[in-house]
Amino acid sequence: MLLTKQQHLDPNVRPKRILLLDGGGIRGILTLEYLSAIENMLRKRSGRDDFLLCDYFDLIGGTSTGSIVAAGLACGMSVDRLKQLYRDLGKTVFVSKIYRKGILVPKFPSEPVQKALDAQLGAETTLDGDRIRTGLMIMAKRLDTGGPWPLHNHPNARYAQQDGKLLLTQVVRASTAAPTYFEPQTIEISSRDGRVVKGAFVDGGVSPFNDPALQLLMLAVLEGHGFRWQAGKDKLLLISLGTGTLQEDIHVGRARKDGGGGARRALAGIADGRLCAAESLHAAVADTLRYAMADRSCRADHGGR
């Protein structure tokens, strides 16, 4: 028998299963291939051709492109439907216009993204809405304060009354608003003193949680978020899916002759190196906690050169 959303969130219904989806732009199509394999295996195991990943996982979370997939899965979309959504977004969104050139001008328009999300997830769907069939977390970053914001749908969370009324498509659009590529998403939120303020939100991938594994684990087991799930063997399963990596090799002769281009690559290399170091530290902490607290953990990613 399929679980209700209340049963998915209930800490007494075990084991708990968490699906974690990285950011990575259009490379999210690689994540969908992993998910397709998982969906097919679960359909064979259940004997149901209509079995969905939201029927199996109790909490699905994602950052940036992973937030689109996470929201779609949590709303009962099949992996095939999400693949079609990605193909449509690739054709209609990632098309740069001449009049959008400039350092301070976003490279791509946000309207096609919002329109596609509204069509697939429902323009009026809220984070606490019944259309969402299991636990869901969307990782964003608030640009005006610099803090990471994990927005989720547990009704017992500290900020559930505020966050639950947010429109799902706006939250997802915020998580995908990569700086310089898309405009920040403005969302009205309540401040600690009760005032309604406007916050500017951008891609969660520019926070420490492009891989949201650590954030999801803390969300599930720590106080204050409402879940309060137990950790340990046979109690918690985490599956973490990446979007692959690409490393460009530059011939030594070209590197010596390329002047300004080489300088730009050097500066980018410094930034990438620091980012990789931060991500490695974050991954090490996340892996340690995953194995210590969940015992059953799987990470799938594909690196390329």
Image (cartoon, rainbow, N blue to C red):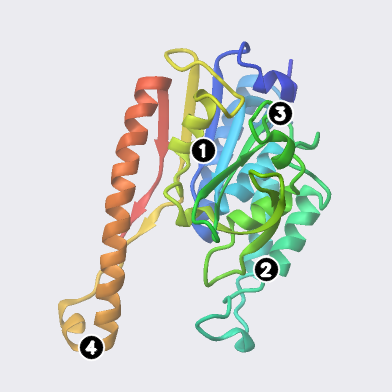
Q: Residue at x 54, y 34 (%)?
A: 19
Which residue in the structure is indicated by mark 4? 259
Measure the alpha-carbon separation of dots 4 and 3.
56 Å
- Closest to the observer: 252 or 58? 58
User: Helix, strand or loop at disc 4?
Assistant: helix
User: What amino acid does circle 3 point to?
Assistant: Pro
Residue 141 against residue 193 in the figure, above or below: below
Residue 135's tag is: none
Residue 215 against residue 200 in the figure, above or below: above
Residue 155's tag is: 3
Which residue in the structure is indicated by mark 1? 20
Measure the alpha-carbon separation of dots 1 and 4.
41 Å
Disc 2 or 1, which lies upstream in sequence?
Answer: 1
The image position of residue 141, as x and y in percent, is 54, 53
User: What amino acid does circle 2 point to?
Assistant: Ser
- On the question of residue 76 being in view, the answer is no
User: What amino acid does circle 1 point to?
Assistant: Leu
Q: Residue at x 68, y 61 (%)?
A: 186
Q: Nearer the viewer, mark 2 or mark 1?
A: 2
Disc 1 or 3, which lies upstream in sequence?
Answer: 1
User: What amino acid does circle 4 point to?
Assistant: Gly
- Residue count near mark 3 (Cα–Cα under 10 Å), binned few <14, some 14–19, many ≥20: some
Which residue in the structure is indicated by mark 2? 110
Quadrant of the drawing holding the N terminus: top right
Q: Residue at x 26, y 66 (%)?
A: 270
